[in-house]
Image (spheres, coloured by chain):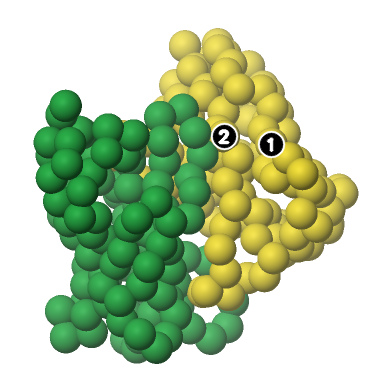
Amino acid sequence: AQSVTQPDIHITVSEGASLELRCNYSYGATPYLFWYVQSPGQGLQLLLKYFSGDTLVQGIKGFEAEFKRSQSSFNLRKPSVHWSDAAEYFCAVGARGGSYIPTFGRGTSLIVHP
Amino acid sequence: NAGVTQTPKFRVLKTGQSMTLLCAQDMNHEYMYWYRQDPGMGLRLIHYSVGEGTTAKGEVPDGYNVSRLKKQNFLLGLESAAPSQTSVYFCASSKALTGLETQYFGPGTRLLVL
């Protein structure tokens, strides 16, 4: 079975600073990987996903993530954070083949200081 | 196109009371899911459905029942609410049940059990 770890519970950055949120997964093969964002009081929205090919994935709202097989990681990045990026971010991993529901990490809460 | 909607948005129950949470989707998705979200725990799958009339247990099914009488609706029932069921409940849907599929989430229902 697959699993995912988000080691940071909270991350605080200043507006305009760069951002990197960490995600590590455990799976026996190359997984499908996702990042979702949950704005306050809202449901989750897909930011981006990786399924094959280019290991650098571009998403919505200026986010990108890089799949690194050697490190079993799929870190989310943004070069310049805006106050509206303050939210909860979830990494998820899905198994290839068969019928599998993605497994979600515990989430990282992003706080943006003005 | 409303996507995934949830009713009610917020509810307070007393221990032992029952209630039903309603999820509706207008995307003609076959697959629907109920999650609960607790601080530091991320999203945990309660039950899911692979089509009209079929349901299956997820990671934390105890104390909950579900029904999928119509393709567009997925109901989550609490027969005898307990304080441990205080949580935010999210419904989601997807076109297919593979590790790759994007899930579309509703805005959530906040439930407080006293």
Quadrant where the N terminus of chain A lies? bottom left
Could you tell me the amino acid type at mark 2? Pro
Question: What is the chain letter for disc 2?
Answer: B
- The foreground one among A55 and B110 is A55
Which shade of the palette goes to chain B?
yellow
How many numbered discs sit on the rendered protein? 2
- The foreground one among A15 and B9 is A15
Residue at 27%, 33% (x, y): give it. A83
Residue farthest right in this picture: B70
Residue at 38%, 80% (x, y): give it. A31
Question: What is the chain letter for disc 1?
Answer: B
Q: Residue B35 in the image: x percent, y percent?
A: 52, 45
Residue at 44%, 80% (x, y): give it. A51
Q: Is residue B89 left or right of residue A34?
A: right
Q: Residue B99 in the image: x percent, y percent?
A: 51, 74
Q: Residue B79 in the image: x percent, y percent?
A: 66, 29
Whether residue A54 is visible, yes or no, is yes
For the residues marked 1 and 2, what is the alpha-carbon distance in whole angstroms?
Answer: 7 Å
Residue that badge 2 annotates: B107
- The foreground one among A2 and B1 is B1
Could you tell me the amino acid type at mark 1? Thr
Which shade of the palette goes to chain A?
green
Secondary-structure class at tag 1: strand
Residue that badge 1 annotates: B5
Q: Is residue A54 above or below residue B7?
A: below
Q: Is residue A51 above or below residue B14?
A: below
Contact between labelled residues 2 and 1, with CB atoms less than 8 Å apart? yes
